[in-house]
Image (cartoon, rainbow, N blue to C red):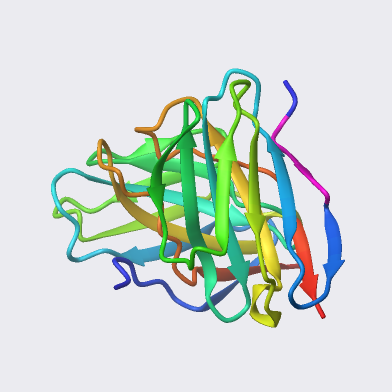
Amino acid sequence: DAKTTQPTSMDCAEGRAANLPCNHSTISGNEYVYWYRQIHSQGPQYIIHGLKNNETNEMASLIITEDRKSSTLILPHATLRDTAVYYCIVWERGTASKLTFGTGTRLQVTL
Amino acid sequence: KAGVTQTPRYLIKTRGQQVTLSCSPISGHRSVSWYQQTPGQGLQFLFEYFSETQRNKGNFPGRFSGRQFSNSRSEMNVSTLELGDSALYLCASSLRVDTGELFFGEGSRLTVL
C-alpha cells in the first residue's frame, strides 16, 4: 500500500520556486521523509530527507508540517534541468525494509 | 569519486534466455540494492546485499537472483526470460544498510523479444 500521495504532475516557470507537496498522513514516529528525483533515462537521484525539522541543502528545502502528516519539497529557483519525476518516500531507519517508490510527481519546468 | 557503474547499458534477449547484469558500487560502499523499473509497475525493489549476504528480497519469482562479491561488486541474473521482464534494471549503492540515501547507477535496459 502506498504510504505517500503526490499530485501526478505539476508545471513551474523557470526561475520560479517549485513547491512539490506530499501527503503521508499515516507516517509513524520513526519514519523519515525522503525525496528523490529521476530525470528521464537516468537513475533516481537523492535530494534530501528529514524527520521532524525543516531541512535545507544545496539542492532544495524540505518543509515538514508539525504533525508530520505532510511535507513540501521546495526548489527555490527551478531551471529546465529540474524537469523530472519527483518521488516522496517514507522510510523507517533501522528496519530491513527498503525504499518504496510510488508514482511520484512529474514536474515540468517551462520557459 | 566514480559513481555506480552498471553494465551492459542496453541489451536485447529472446524469451527463454538468461541474462546477467553487473553493478560496481561507489568505492567504499558495501551495500548494493537492485530495482526493476517498468512503465506499468514503476520502481520495484528486487533485493539488497551487504557483505556478500542477501539481506532483503522483494516480491519477485525465483528466476531473479543475485549475488555480491568480496569487493562489493554485484551481479543479478534472470533466467528463462519472459516478455514482461523487459525493463530498466537499476543498481544502487550505499555506505551502510541503515540509510535511505542511495546512489543509483544509470541502469541496464533489457528488452526481451
* Residue drawn at (63%, 49%) of the image: B76
Picture quadrant of residue B3: top right
Magenta highlight on residue A84 = no
In which quadrant is the C terminus of chain A drawn?
A: bottom right
Relative to B77, is A56 on the left or the right? Answer: left
Picture layout, residue A8 above or below residue A110: below
Magenta highlight on residue B4 = yes
The number of discs equals: 0
Residue B109 x/y as whole percent: 77, 62
Relative to B106, is A59 on the left or the right? Answer: left
Asked if one can make out residue B88 in the rendered structure from this viewpoint, the answer is yes
Magenta-tinted stretch: B3-8
Picture layout, residue A8 above or below residue A104: below
Residue situated in front as seen by the camera: A82 or B79? B79
* Residue drawn at (37%, 37%) of the image: A55
Picture quadrant of residue B110: bottom right
